[in-house]
Image (tube, helix red, strand yellow):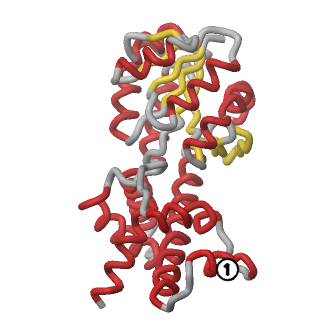
Amino acid sequence: MKIGFIGLGLMGEAMASNIIKKHPEPVYVFDVDPAKAEALEKVGGRRAAGAREIAASCDVVISMVPKSEHVQAVYGEMLDEMRPNQVYIDMSTIDPKVSVELSVKVQEKGAAMLDAPVVKSRPAALLGKLGIYVGGEKRVYESVRFILEYMGCSILYMGGNGSGLTMKILHNMMVAQIQNAVNETLSMAERCHIQYDQFAKAIACGGGQNFYLDSKLETIREKRYEAVFSVENMNKDVNIAVDMAREMGMNYPGMELVRQLYGQAMGEGGKKDFSYLYEIVTENAKKE
């Protein structure tokens, strides 16, 4: 079974590397930056000229690109090469509606499509320990689960097409709201002369312990905001969540608040790590 991987960014490169290491057959790779594909060619990948070549050559095609418009462009390039019995797995985090629309076009070619966005960040991707939420036909999912296991250790089947992405958007919105609670209370603790370590230790004794505080405390203390997961990416996801809620006629003030905060952060720190919002929340508090 030949596998193709399109999109070798911060996450995609690590994910593709694991497939190359673990899969016994050829793994074709492509990125708009040729240097990224060349780097994986040195460790056993086969560099492709483009997405169209990967669709023509491979049985399973995986994509991991930033936004809905990028997925649409990639699938538009591959559409004429799609054929029966192929499986397309999009692991990007995009609008679920866009993914469902693409899945219909793929099915019309006799192929199948899964949405399989990931949770956790690059360190987990390097270790092959991502969480993966899967949407699509269950039979198709079961046929390629072993490939997903090259990249992840917590793989959850969520239902039909778009359901994996819906779960991912809900996950990231929850993270963003937990993040805001941490940022506000940590900022207030600092003003009350409670040290960061004291704060974290005290929270861990009660019911407020959470992964964001545990993993980002040192980053915030040292103000080292090199992106592991960027403000830009989280901004995209929280806006998708708010749009989904509005389309359902629902209004969630907490979602609107984090959307506003991320919009503010984009003006000065879009490429920084999403933990940079601590600085935004702290500055906003001083303006009151």
- Which of the pair 55/278 is nearer the observer? 278
165 versus 222 height, above or below = above
Question: Can residue 204 be seen in this snapshot?
Answer: yes
x 58%, y 31%: residue? 15
Side (left or right) of 159 relative to 28 = right
Question: Residue at image x 42%, y 22%?
Answer: 36
Q: Secondary structure at mark 1?
A: helix
Above/below status of 269 relative to 213: above
Tell me which amino acid carries mark 1.
Answer: Ile
Residue found 55% across the figure and 60% down from its top: 170
The answer to whether residue 244 of the structure is visible from this angle is no
Outermost residue on the left side: it is 267
Specify whether 14 is left or right of 141.
left
Q: Is residue 137 above or below residue 36?
A: below
Identify which residue is drawn at 73% across, 40% down.
153
In the rendered image, the quadrant that contains the C terminus is: bottom left
> Where in the figure is residue 18, as x and y percent of width and height?
63, 26
Q: Nearer the viewer, residue 247 or 223?
A: 223
State the image coordinates of residue 127 (x, y, percent, origin top left).
Answer: 67, 36
- Residue 113 lies, in percent from the top left, at 56, 30
Residue identifier under label 1: 203
User: Residue 43 location, x and y as percent?
Assistant: 56, 14
**Relative to 115, is 151 on the left or the right?**
right
